[in-house]
Image (cartoon, rainbow, N blue to C red):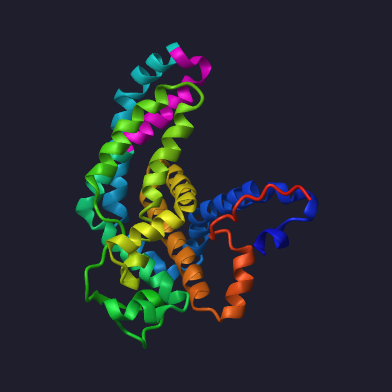
Amino acid sequence: MASESQLPPPLRSFERPYNYVSRALIAGSYPLRGIYYFLRRPAFYPLFLSRLLPLTIISTLVYTILFLFTFLPQYAFLAIFHGRGAWFNALVLVLGEGLVIIQALFEGFFVDECRVDVFDATLINEGLETLVAPHRLLFPDAPNPVKKLGKPTSAAVYQPWSLIQIVELFICLPLNLIPYVGTPAFLIITGARLGTFAHYRWFELRGLNKKERKVAVRNRNWDYTWFGTVAMILQLVPVLSFFFLVTSTAGSAMWAARLEHEMHAPPEIQGHASEDDPDAPPPPYVDNPV
C-alpha cells in the first residue's frame, strides 16, 4: 500500500496530512519550474518577445496610474484597521485591481494563442508530439519544438475567456480589507479558480468532453488550487505579469507531460509510481495507531 511505503510505522497517523502537503508543494512548484524551463530554452523566446513590447507598455501604464492615484487613499483607509501592516494589504489590493484591468486588455493581444503555442511546444519537447499532431499542423523536420508548430486544425484554447473569473476576482478584492487573513484568502480563492484551467488545453488534446473535464478537475482540485495560487502570486508582479503568465503555462505543460507519461507507462511502472504520486487521491483514513 502507498501509505505503508511513504512513512515509517510510528508516523503513519500523519499519512493523510503528509500526502496533502506533499501534493500542494509539488503542484505549487510547477509555476516556478516553468520559469527555469522557459529561460533554459532560447527557442521559446520568440513566442514571448513578439508580444512583449505592447503588453509591457500596457502593464506599466496601468500600474503607474493605479499607484499614483489609488495606492495612498487605499493605504490611508486600510491603516485604520491594519495599522503598520496596511501597506502590504494596500499593495496587494492595487496589484489585484491592476490584474483585473490587464487581464481584460490582454485578450486583445492574442495572449491565449501565445499560451497555446508555449503549451504545445513544451509537450513536443517532452516527447509528446503524437498528442499534439492530431490537432495542428506540424513540421517534423524543423530544428526545435517552436518551429515545428503549424496552424491549429481544431479549436485551440489554453484558458477559455471567463467573465465569471474576472467578476470573481473583482468581488474578492475587498477580502484584502480583512486584517491578517484577508490577503491569503484572496490569493487562495482566486488561485483556486485560476488553477482549474491549468490543464484545459491538455484535456482538449485528449478529447475529453465537458463532463470528463469536470471529473478530471475534481480529482485534482487540491493540486490545482495550489498551482493556481502560486501562479496568481507571480501574475501580481508588476510589469512581469505577462512573462510569468507564459512561464506558468510552460509549468502546466511540464506537469501534464509527466501525467501523460505515467498514464501510458507499463503496469508495473504505474504501480510503482502510484506509491509516490502526489497527484493521486490521498488514502482513506484508518484509525489504526499500531
Is residue 171 magenta-colored? no
Percent x, y of residue 86: 47, 20
Residue drawn at the location 58% of the way across and 59% of the way down: 278
Residue at the top extreme of this rendering: 80
Is residue 91 magenta-colored? yes
Residue drawn at the location 36% of the way across and 74% of the way down: 146
Q: Main secondary structure of the magenta part?
A: helix
- Decide which of 39, 236 is in the foreground and name it: 236
Residue drawn at the location 36% of the way across and 70% of the way down: 120
What span is in magenta? Answer: 81-98
Q: Is 77 rendered above or below residue 235? A: above
Q: Is 56 rendered above or below residue 44? A: above
Residue drawn at the location 34% of the way across and 61% of the way down: 213
- Decide which of 283, 248 is in the foreground and name it: 283
Say whether residue 86 is visible: yes
Percent x, y of residue 150: 27, 77
Q: Is 98 rendered above or below residue 153? A: above
Percent x, y of residue 208: 32, 68
- Decide which of 120, 208 is in the foreground and name it: 208
Percent x, y of residue 32: 52, 54
Q: In this view, does 209 lie to the left or right of 250?
A: left
